[in-house]
Image (cartoon, helix red, strand yellow):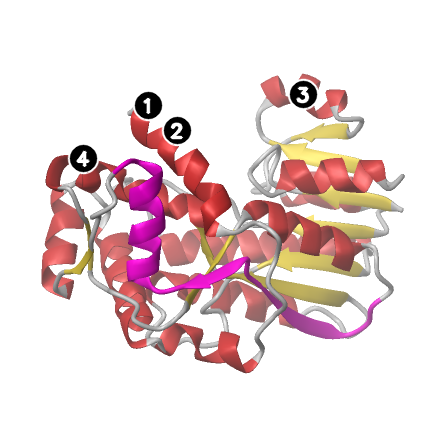
Amino acid sequence: MKIVVTGSLGHISKPLTIDLIKKGHSVTVISSNPKKQKNIKALGASAAIGSIADVQFLATTFTGADAIYCMEPPVNFFDPNLNLIEYYNQLGNNYKQAILQSGVKRVIHLSSIGAHTDKNNGILIFHFNVENIFRNLPDNVAIVFLRPVGFYYNLLGFIPTIKTRGLIATNYNAKYKEPWVSPIDIAAVAAEEITKNFEGKKIRYVASDELTSDEIASILGKAISKPDLKWTAISDEQQLNNLVAAGMNSQSAKGLVEMNAARHTGELFEDYYRNRPVLGKIKLTDFANEFAECYHQK
């Protein structure tokens, strides 16, 4: 198969590309960074250097592909001029137009937990919006919406607070089993889905492990030789003030606080548990080694 992968050599796109090439597929990787061209070719893939903000570039790159993997890259939440919703809506429409122009008929779209609703999901509402943009593609365009849960590497954001205060502090504490995921497991699912013959539009959640907040604190604490590490819930107001004081864009800060509030109640995961997937191979205990390395480096 001829497959186009967006996301350059990121956490998911790189292992996805490696997996597809090992299985004998012809892969083109889109990157906005010309310096990545050499590394992309070293994997055995072709490099397409350009911006996903350029519809014509996307359409040209997609043309002739049997399937494509589409993802929206992360943004700088500390950019004061960022309008997160508008930015991602535009990227979604770029993909839609490029798919229509290119005639590609099989799409894997990296969405997210929280994309099932436009209520109380905070910053994740953009995934709901972009899914709906993709859903407006013709019926003969088959799409799998991958909905991964919280990424393990997001936990690295707790390192400064652990170092300064000796605890994890955020505006939720999951007493239920909250799902988490490794990018390696997401890549494996994406590789599986993109090489299938599929029709219509379907959803697949992706998760690697399910743990309470206290269990997470215990695992990470042992990894960094702080076995008494605690996970502490603070108020929404405290969390918002902390994020804004750190320089985060106010729209993004409010969205993150709302998202965490839905994690605290479990509301964010209601659709996930209605469509619970088989868990992947990479557990939090595996990631804990990487967490410890990062903790001791900073």
Q: Which residue is mark 3?
A: 39
Q: Residue at x 31, y 61 (%)?
A: 213
Quarter assignment of residue 80? top left
Q: CA distance from mark 1 to mark 3?
A: 25 Å
The numbered mark, 4 or 2, whose residue comes first in the sequence reads 4
Amino acid type indicated by mark 1 = Gln
Residue 266 vertical position relative to residue 93 in the rendered view, above or below: below
Q: Residues within 10 Å of mark 1 (few under 14, many from 20)?
A: few
Residue 95 rendering spot, x and y as whole percentages: 64, 53
Specify the label residue 293 is tagged with.
Answer: 2
Amino acid type indicated by mark 3 = Asn
Circles 2 and 3, Cβ within 8 Å, touching? The answer is no
Residue 26 appears anywhere in the view:
no
Residue 183 appears anywhere in the view:
yes
**Region in magenta:** 198-225
Q: Which residue is mark 4?
A: 163
Residue 290 vertical position relative to residue 96 in the rendered view, above or below: above
Q: Nearer the viewer, residue 203 or 129?
A: 203
